[in-house]
């Protein structure tokens, strides 16, 4: 097994300081400083100091009340986001652990996985201390005391032996210092029975789990069955620019949940929860995003959501965001393709496999920015009448049901309305007499919607040698010859 441990020492501050630009800051619990940012530490503010003493040292200090519930929520969002790397996650006190041995091949090795994990954590706005070890307890100890990597059992034991006792076992540090112990290696060299009689049984059990000498069972993190996450803002937002950070947190969690479930989002909604005005509750604002190409890529989902947020006018202040997954499709993985590169001449290699996904992603962004009905495409319809065989529809959203194309030739330019033609001895005229070369193709339809047609279509050529698509209407008041399209 191989464990990654992410210790979040700044989590109490990151949970309550989102969007707060004032410096210096500190987190306070029961009027005692729990954590101070670097600017406050430089002025002498330290954890354990009373708030009054801290303000005496630094009158400009901004105290923030600790919010354990928000810390747990932020840690859970981080766990959902990290679910894209492995389904085996464990949550602890300011700690997130991932068992990644089975994910190394999928991500192309440990260095590639670590780069992806760091990008994910940076997008969440967290500053973790990361460590790697073959056991979960060792990885957690390294993350808290001495961040670094120990991928082999021998290297892990060497690093554990060198860990300072006052960092890894502060409760027993004073007692063990009195008998000459300074590191965990010194403790392991002592007789076990004597240590147990002196109250170090818990420490010995910890060391057994860390060194891999005893089982270390863990309770895995269980993601929700359906994705619906709500995040309350620290400050009421009057414009959409202030919603970006919180929205991207939820998007990262959604992307991780989708990857863990082997799904891709086809449509999702961001609900903006507004403050009540007097006795009247303001209805929430719903921003629904329908994707032309289902995706679980956090960057793509975030870009589309940002474009949609930029066009939204808030009817009132927003106090919370809620992200819901509306529609999802199964997506086990991505087709393998060669990476982009260049040859010696500097010419870019062309990856045809990326053309369609990139084009559909562009359509999603344009639809979010301009509006769904301002970006349209033609969709085939199950109707034999040429003027009804295709209709414009929004470019985003799920693809239309496939319709079999006719085997006979069709013109590239279809007139908006068929043009009535003159006749001479029963033959159509258009810049002179037309010669019929193909047909007839009988199209008789429309009886089901009150617009029946009965036409015989031909391919005709005129004196200018241009090919035309003409038909002869056989029934009704509009009998005669008509021009319906031109071939390219």
Image (spheres, grey):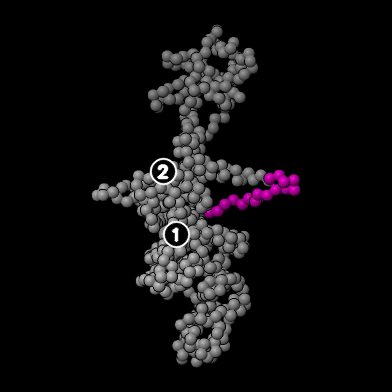
| Magenta-colored segment: predominant secondary structure | loop
Dividing the picture into quadrants, the one containing residue 62 is: bottom left
Residue at 48 percent across and 56 percent down: it is 252
Which mark is first along the chain, 2 or 1?
1
Residue at 47 percent across and 67 percent down: it is 40
Secondary structure under badge 2?
Answer: loop
Residue where numbered disc 2 is placed:
312
Dividing the picture into quadrants, the one containing residue 100 is: bottom right
Left or right relative to 391: residue 232: left
x, y (%) of residue 181?
54, 87
x, y (%) of residue 402?
51, 38
Residue where numbered disc 1 is placed:
22
Residue 140 counted in the magenta span: no
Residue at 53 percent across and 44 percent down: it is 361
**Magenta span of residues:** 327-348
In the rendered structure, are the residues bearing label 1 and label 2 in contact, judged by CB atoms less than 8 Å apart?
A: no
Residue at 53 percent across and 71 percent down: it is 143
Q: Nearer the viewer, residue 201 or 449?
A: 201
Secondary structure under badge 1?
Answer: loop
Q: Nearer the viewer, residue 269 or 12?
A: 12
Left or right relative to 148: residue 193: left
> Does residue 302 sit above or below 476 in this rendering?
below
Q: Please identify the quadrant where the N terminus is shown.
A: bottom right
């Amino acid at each position: 097994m191989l464990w990654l441990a992410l210790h979040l020492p700044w989590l109490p501050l990151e949970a309550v300081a989102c969007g707060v630009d004032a410096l210096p800051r500190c987190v306070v619990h029961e009027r005692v400083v729990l954590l101070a940012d670097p600017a406050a530490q430089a002025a002498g503010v330290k954890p354990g100091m009373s708030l009054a003493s801290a303000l005496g040292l630094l009158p400009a200090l901004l105290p923030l009340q600790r919010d354990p519930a928000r810390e747990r929520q932020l840690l859970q969002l981080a766990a959902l986001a990290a679910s894209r790397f492995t389904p085996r996650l464990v949550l602890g006190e300011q700690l997130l652990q991932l068992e990644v041995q089975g994910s190394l091949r999928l991500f192309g090795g440990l260095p590639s996985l670590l780069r992806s994990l760091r990008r994910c954590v940076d997008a969440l706005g967290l500053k973790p201390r990361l460590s790697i070890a073959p056991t979960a307890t060792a990885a957690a100890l390294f993350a808290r005391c001495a961040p670094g990597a120990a991928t082999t059992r021998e290297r892990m034991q060497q690093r554990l032996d060198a860990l300072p006792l006052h960092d890894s076992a502060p409760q027993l540090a004073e007692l063990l210092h009195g008998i000459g112990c300074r590191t965990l290696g010194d403790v392991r060299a002592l007789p076990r029975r004597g240590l147990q009689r002196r109250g170090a049984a818990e420490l010995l059990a910890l060391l057994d789990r860390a060194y891999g000498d005893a089982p270390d069972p863990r309770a895995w993190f269980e993601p929700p069955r359906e994705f619906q996450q709500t995040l309350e803002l620290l400050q009421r937002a009057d414009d959409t620019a202030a919603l970006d950070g919180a929205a991207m947190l939820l998007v990262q969690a959604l992307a991780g949940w989708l990857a863990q479930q082997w799904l891709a989002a086809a449509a999702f909604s961001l609900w903006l929860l507004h403050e009540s005005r007097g006795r009247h509750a303001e209805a929430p604002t719903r921003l629904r995003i329908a994707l032309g190409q289902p995706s679980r890529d956090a960057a793509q989902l975030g870009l589309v959501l940002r474009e949609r947020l930029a066009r939204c006018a808030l009817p009132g202040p927003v106090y919370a965001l809620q992200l819901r997954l509306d529609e999802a499709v199964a997506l086990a993985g991505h087709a393998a393709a060669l990476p982009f590169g260049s040859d010696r001449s500097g010419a870019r290699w062309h990856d045809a496999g990326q053309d369609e996904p990139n084009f559909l992603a562009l359509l999603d962004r344009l639809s979010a920015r301009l509006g769904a009905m301002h970006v349209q495409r033609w969709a085939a319809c199950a109707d034999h009448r040429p003027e009804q065989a295709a209709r414009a529809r929004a470019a985003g959203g799920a693809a239309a049901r496939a319709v079999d194309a006719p085997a006979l030739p069709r013109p590239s330019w279809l007139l908006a309305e068929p043009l009535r033609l003159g006749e001479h001895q029963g033959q159509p005229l258009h810049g002179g007499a037309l010669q019929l070369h193909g047909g007839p193709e009988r199209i008789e339809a429309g009886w089901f919607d009150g617009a029946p047609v009965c036409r015989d279509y031909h391919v005709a050529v005129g004196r200018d040698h241009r090919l035309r698509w003409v038909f002869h209407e056989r029934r009704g008041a509009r009998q005669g010859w008509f021009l319906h399209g031109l071939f390219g």
